[in-house]
Amino acid sequence: MAGLRRRMAAMTSSARPLLNRRLAEFGTTIFAEMSALALSTGSINLGQGFPDTDGPEQVREAAVRALRDGRGNQYPPGPGVPELRAAIAEHQKRRYGIELDADREVLVTAGATEAIAASLLALVEPGDEVIAFEPYYDSYAASIAMAGGTRVPVTLRPSVEDGAARFRLDLDELRAAITPRTRLLLINTPHNPTGTVLTRAELTAIAELAVERDLLVVTDEVYEHLTFDGAEHVPLATLPGMRERTVTIGSAGKTFSFTGWKVGWVTSTPELVTAVRSAKQFLTYVSAGPFQYAVAEALALPDSYFADFRADMTAKRDLLAAGLTEAGFEVFRPAGTYFVTTDIRPLDASGDGFAFCRALPERCGVVAIPNAVFYDDRAAGAPFVRFAFCKREDVLAEAVGRLKRL
């Protein structure tokens, strides 16, 4: 033990840092900081995107039944339990017309975060460029770094269309970002944090670029069932030339409000799924055994469940968006996801989202997330702040009342 302590002391006192250089830029996530701030100040936490109520009772009972019946209490199969893989394949066929071999083209993961990490670790070589739409979910940057890739952001920019403020993709900027070293496009739609849902025309243009430049695509579609105002979710794999080059990522957490279960999945060709599984097996190997059986039942819920879920979230979005507008923010009305992005400059001329969010709990007892953490170009994201509306209506109403103090 004394020898180990001496070696550790020598390491920490040497010029070489303990954390490898690929992860040196990543510290404690903003979510941990802001959630701790919510607890210490007794604030309403509209920062982190998790519901404050459980999902369908019948799905929760399915997990209890699996536990009691001894299904999944030991290691489940590496690719996932057959019932869940079959349910995922059926879901993709029923919703989108995508035909999948449940045994060879579906892989269950420990949530979408592991699916993203395993996909990038499997498909990206050191030095490869990976294009991601900025602002992006924070695990994208870390996963690209762990794979030794170089991230290349293409920024979704605010615009006003038909009197509504939204974030939009510049397809010319995307095309210009592709170089001979580009290996992969990392697409997220519906998009966290901006709430943008890429249109069929935009996705068709992306697909044409991917085919033209022979690029792989990883597409994060965890909010596929949360689109509003008639916005259409179009899986990229359904477009011409994309089935054989697209890794599609889904998740049960956002759709069924059981985020703690961490059940996600990858669907693609046998070759791409095998590649992702090669990395995934050395991350968690397997996880969430009993919950996999419950998610299999959840995916078979009738269409009315998904319609009711969307209607409930639409009402919550409208409640929070109206309250934020009344409080003085410029509001970017989301077409999908759990989140409303705002511009703070009508309330704070400095446009410093970090300072604004750190002061907000003391000012009015609400916690939000500064969007700048999702940008490489921190200045571009500085004035934008994200609020989550996946909370009970009474909680949102209380938060709206508090925000009026601004």
Image (spheres, helix red, strand yellow):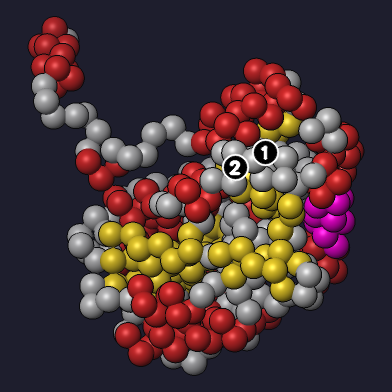
In the picture, the disc for residue 75 is none
Q: Residue at x 77, y 75 (%)?
A: 162
Q: Is residue 364 visible?
A: yes
Asked whether residue 26 is drawn in magenta, I would say: no
Q: Which residue is mark 2?
A: 351
Mark 1: which amino acid?
Asp
Above/below status of 162 relative to 299: below
Q: For marks 2 and 1, give the CA distance.
A: 6 Å
Q: Position of residue 186 (x, y in %)?
A: 43, 67
Q: Which residue is mark 1?
A: 348
Residue 374 in the figure: left or right of residue 58: left
Query: Which residues make up the magenta segment?
Result: 311-323
Q: Residue at x 35, y 73 (%)?
A: 177
Residue 273 in the figure: left or right of residue 199: left
Q: Position of residue 315 (x, y in %)?
A: 87, 56
Q: Residue at x 86, y 46 (%)?
A: 326
